[in-house]
């Protein structure tokens, strides 16, 4: 039990500390691309990443750092990508919003809302055709659920009974637009999807262990041919939609709401779970120190890497 | 009364005036009422005109475009806004198969007077899916009007013309123009769609340009003047319908053509300019036409690549000098480079 908890904590904290470092260094203007941080939303990424195998597929959105790292992504190459360097996981071509690493099954994150959802279903189709027991996981937010591409994809995953794990992180906002200007009041996204023929459920996005247990069960069933599943997890981003800062001065979310969610921080819960499982403060500190060292190395790697050159990057338009 | 205001404010003013002038004008888009108000362009609208006329929308570009088109078929004049052109690609079906074709396909009975504002990103790692310049796609479609102003005063006048035009208009705003100031009249006025503007007169070469590239052309022309080369800059303002008369008159005068484009070259607006000049007034050309576009590749995100990807004043000077057998001064060329190259100015606060 505590081994699993330690793994979950390590993964979530790795994401948290990495993104805090991005946030701290962003204003040095050396990461010159839009960047969407998941601080506050690490629980889903850490849990699902561990519930999946390395050879399972994942696709994601503009907010993909956490999903990438959770899925076993390489910290050095992610940071290099954000710095626009040749050593980046997408060759420095894509920046923060376009992470791809075939070695850990992270096929790609794209920045048009909803754009990668059909791609994930297509990967699911390929799995079915190839008759393997892999799973295709699609990470997206509540905003993506408004795109036609989402409905078309869910429908097809249901029609073909594809091994697709729809992973909706509902953080209640699309940029600054709250759910109530985008979706009817009483809708539960997971219930709507169930009515479309895909099994679904909802859970607490701050309870990392809970997510892990639930999603592991789903994935097990999916490997045995039970078809697509839609998970909705309620979660909250602590910082602004895009960029390194707090933006609560804008007043688009109430102080009470923000405070309440900050109090439900998934990392605090994980740490408490560790302690109540007999893990010592010292062990927890050691984990942190190791991660900090790893993160420093990654930033150094990114900063010291070269930019790509036009000759290499534009060798050919086609493969 | 005229005063100097930025492009984004001119857009905002145009929407205010349009909504005051006609109750049928509505304004919507993702983030229309959020605290940032679409780079300030929807400031004050919801407070003045209410949420039934000014509203945020679901992340549903395709569906919501169709909704706008439908409303426009029954007397509503929607102004629909997207923070990036790229997000709007979901809606190509509604704009190409519905909005653009309606008037023709149903026997000239009704048209779809919707105005769609699309903002084009540039720099700061906007990359392959946040900075595409797809004006030539839209201009390819019969039935659409495509407007691309450069200055704040043109932006206001052209937006008002667009809103009260009877046809669907794609109104393209380059993000790097949002903070560029010019003298803008306070009152209602229209700038006709389909009329180009000579932004500076000259006798040696015609530079045909539009939107952001016109600014780069203006910087280049100043340097070229030092070398005794006098440029006539034609700012198209409207891509479709295109003001061929102004283009042809200028090329007949100078005998030389440089067509600029902020997109990739294949089937671009610049290639259309070159092609039509060759087809229609070939005899007035004293040398082969020139063209400067972005490279024929996806746009990169990396600072190391964007430095060489975006073309501007420096490249214009080099190209024109080559054609005129002039050796440009290295200092002049360095002066023309933006530093840093990926932000429009100090006012720009990333990261979007
Ligand atoms: C098609 C499209 N429309 C609009 C945008 C602008 N945009 C970028 S992120 C975002 C928010 C989407 O919200 P959600 O899917 O809930 O994800 P979150 O940012 O909350 O993680 C929007 C609207 C976009 N990238 N693509």
Image: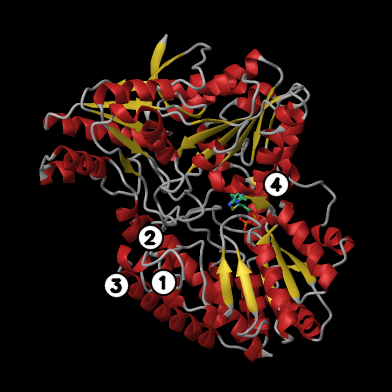
- Horizontal side of residue B24 vs B290, given as left or right: right
In the displayed structure, B3 sits above or below A179; it is: above
- Give the Cα separation between the discs numbered 2 and 4: 29 Å
- Give the Cα separation between the discs numbered 3 and 1: 12 Å
* Kind of element beneath mark 3: helix
**Residue B60 disc label:** 4
Residue at (42, 65) in percent of width and height: A82
Number of the front mark, 2 or 3: 2
Q: Chain of mark 3?
A: A
- Residue where numbered disc 3 is placed: A304
Q: Chain of mark 1?
A: A
Name the foreground residue: B124 vs B193: B193
- In which quarter of the view is residue B233 placed? top left
* Kind of element beneath mark 4: loop
* Ligand 1 lies under 8 Å from the Cβ of mark 2: no
**Residue A65 disc label:** none
- Horizontal side of residue B270 vs A52, given as left or right: left
Residue at (54, 42) in percent of width and height: B137
Q: Position of residue B5 (x, y in %)?
A: 41, 23
Q: Position of residue A254 (x, y in %)?
A: 65, 46
**Marks 4, 3 in one chain:** no
- Residue where numbered disc 1 is placed: A88
**Marks 4, 1 in one chain:** no
Q: Chain of mark 4?
A: B
């Amino acid at each position: 039990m505590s081994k699993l908890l330690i793994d979950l904590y390590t993964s979530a904290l790795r994401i948290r500390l990495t993104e805090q470092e991005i946030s701290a260094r962003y204003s040095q203007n050396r990461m010159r691309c839009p960047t969407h941080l998941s601080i506050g939303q690490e629980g889903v990424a850490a849990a699902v990443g561990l519930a999946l195998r390395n050879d399972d597929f994942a696709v994601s959105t503009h907010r993909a750092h956490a999903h990438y790292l959770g899925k076993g992504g390489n910290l050095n190459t992610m940071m290099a990508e954000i710095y626009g360097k040749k050593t980046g996981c997408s060759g420095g071509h894509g920046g923060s919003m376009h992470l791809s690493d075939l070695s850990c099954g992270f096929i790609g994150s794209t920045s048009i809302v909803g754009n990668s959802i059909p791609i994930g279903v297509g990967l699911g189709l390929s799995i079915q055709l190839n008759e393997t027991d892999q799973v295709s996981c699609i990470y997206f937010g509540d905003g993506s659920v408004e795109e036609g591409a989402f409905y078309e994809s869910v429908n097809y995953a249901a029609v073909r009974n594809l091994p697709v794990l729809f992973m909706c992180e509902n953080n209640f906002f699309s940029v600054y637009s709250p759910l109530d200007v985008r979706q009817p009041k009483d809708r539960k996204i997971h219930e709507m999807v169930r009515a479309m023929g895909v099994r679904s459920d909802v859970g607490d996005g701050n309870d990392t262990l809970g997510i892990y247990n639930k999603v592991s069960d789903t994935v097990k069933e999916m490997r045995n041919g039970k078809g697509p599943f839609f998970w909705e997890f309620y979660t909250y981003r602590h910082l602004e939609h895009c960029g390194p800062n707090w933006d609560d001065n804008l007043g688009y979310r109430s102080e009470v709401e923000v405070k309440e969610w900050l109090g439900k921080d998934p990392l605090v819960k994980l740490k408490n779970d560790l302690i109540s499982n007999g893990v010592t403060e010292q062990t927890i500190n050691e984990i942190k120190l190791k991660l900090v060292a790893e993160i420093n190395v990654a930033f150094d790697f990114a900063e010291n890497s070269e930019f790509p050159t036009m000759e290499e990057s534009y060798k050919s338009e086609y493969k | 009364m005229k005063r100097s205001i930025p492009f984004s404010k001119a857009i905002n003013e145009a929407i205010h005036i349009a909504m005051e002038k006609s109750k049928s004008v509505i304004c919507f888009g993702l983030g229309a009422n959020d605290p940032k108000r679409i780079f300030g362009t929807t400031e004050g609208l919801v407070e003045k005109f209410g949420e039934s006329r000014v509203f945020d929308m679901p992340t549903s570009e395709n569906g919501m475009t169709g909704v706008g088109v439908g409303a426009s078929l029954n007397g509503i004049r929607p102004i629909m806004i997207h923070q990036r052109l790229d997000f709007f690609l979901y809606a190509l079906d509604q704009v190409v198969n519905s909005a653009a074709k309606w008037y023709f396909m149903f026997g000239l009975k009704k048209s779809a007077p919707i105005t769609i504002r699309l903002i084009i990103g540039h720099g700061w790692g906007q990359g392959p899916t946040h900075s595409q310049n797809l004006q030539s796609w839209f201009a390819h479609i019969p039935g659409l009007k495509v407007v691309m102003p450069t200055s704040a005063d043109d932006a206001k006048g052209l937006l008002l013309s667009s809103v009260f035009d009877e046809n669907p208009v794609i109104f393209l705003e380059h993000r790097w123009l949002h903070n560029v100031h010019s003298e803008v009249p306070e009152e209602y006025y229209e700038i006709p769609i389909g009329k180009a503007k000579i932004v500076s007169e000259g006798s040696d070469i015609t530079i045909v340009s539009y939107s952001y590239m016109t600014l780069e052309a203006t910087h280049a022309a100043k340097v070229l003047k030092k070398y005794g080369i006098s440029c006539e800059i034609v700012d198209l303002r409207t891509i479709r319908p295109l003001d061929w008369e102004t283009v042809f008159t200028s090329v007949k005068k100078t005998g030389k053509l440089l067509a600029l484009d902020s997109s990739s070259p294949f089937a671009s607006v610049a290639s259309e300019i070159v092609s039509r000049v060759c087809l229609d007034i070939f005899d007035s050309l004293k040398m082969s036409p020139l063209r400067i576009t972005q490279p024929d590749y996806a746009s990169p995100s990396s600072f190391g690549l964007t430095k060489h990807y975006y073309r501007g004043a420096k490249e214009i000077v080099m190209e024109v000098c080559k054609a005129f057998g002039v050796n440009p001064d290295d200092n002049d060329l360095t002066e023309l480079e933006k530093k840093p190259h990926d932000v429009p100015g100090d006012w720009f606060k990333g990261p979007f």
